[in-house]
Amino acid sequence: KAVLWDVAAQRSAHILDGHHKAARAIHANRFCAVSGGEDHTCRVWRFADRSVIEQEAEELAKRVRKAEDISIDAKKAYGARKLKEALRLYRQAAELAPGVLKYLTNLSAVYFEMGDNVSCIMKCREFLTRAQEPSLLDGPAELRPAPALLAKAHSRMATALARSGDVSGAERSLE
């Protein structure tokens, strides 16, 4: 038997039973696991079927659409200089669709306009770090942040750093 352990939940996630000798290599994600054993066999376990995956994709699409609707209202509030309202709405959009990175730059813009340089810098750094994740870089082009958005984040972070007195940090962020 091989036991897949969920580190975050600190519990057994799945027990894989099928090898007649020790399992020597296991690779798993949330959909399936593949193992190789001393019994010279390779085993495959599927945790989720196609309908579950499709349902998750539909739910994600609904959340992204809802987040986009909220983002439209946030943009209106931002344009009307109702910054606290814009901040609340952009936070809500970011929670609904954490994979949509533009909400991080939207939040950084609101913090910037509010004069909260520390929060602005933190959101810019979070955006720039997440924009470099292999899953984004290797994934579909439509999921990658636009180069203009990357430039905006670098520029906004540099300005916030300079406003905070960290001119050398501002220069480094533009390199």
Image (tube, rainbow, N blue to C red):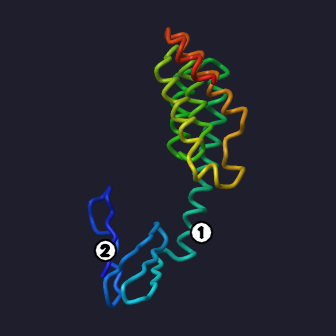
Mark 1 Cα-neighbour bin, 10 Å: few <14, some 14–19, many ≥20: few
Residue 113 in view (yes/no): no
The residue positioned 43% from the left and 78% from the top of the image is 35
Badge 2 element? strand
The residue positioned 62% from the left and 26% from the top of the image is 154
Residue 163 on image: x %, y %: 54, 10
Residue 158 on image: x %, y %: 59, 19
- Type of amino acid at the residue the image marks with label 2: Val
* Quadrant (top left, top right, bottom left, bottom right) of the C terminus: top right
Q: Left or right: 94 with respect to 78?
A: left
Q: Nearer the viewer, residue 166 or 52?
A: 166
How far apart, in angstroms, are the residues tagged by discs 1 and 2? 27 Å
Tag 1 near tag 2, CB within 8 Å:
no
Mark 2 Cα-neighbour bin, 10 Å: few <14, some 14–19, many ≥20: few
Q: Dot 2 corresponds to which residue? A: 3
Badge 1 element? helix
- Type of amino acid at the residue the image marks with label 1: Glu
Residue 45 on image: x %, y %: 45, 80
Q: Left or right: 130 with respect to 43?
A: right
Task: Using the rendered view, name the quadrant where residue 85 is placed.
Answer: top right
Q: Nearer the viewer, residue 135 or 70?
A: 135
As drawn, the label of residue 73 is none
Residue 58 on image: x %, y %: 60, 62
* Quadrant (top left, top right, bottom left, bottom right) of the N terminus: bottom left
Relative to residue 130, is residue 160 depicted above or below?
above
Residue 166 in view (yes/no): yes
Q: Earlier in the sequence, mark 1 or mark 2?
A: 2
Relative to residue 165, is residue 155 depicted above or below?
below
Q: Left or right: 63 with respect to 21?
A: right
Q: Dot 1 corresponds to which residue? A: 54
Relative to residue 123, is residue 98 depicted above or below?
below
The residue positioned 51% from the left and 24% from the top of the image is 121
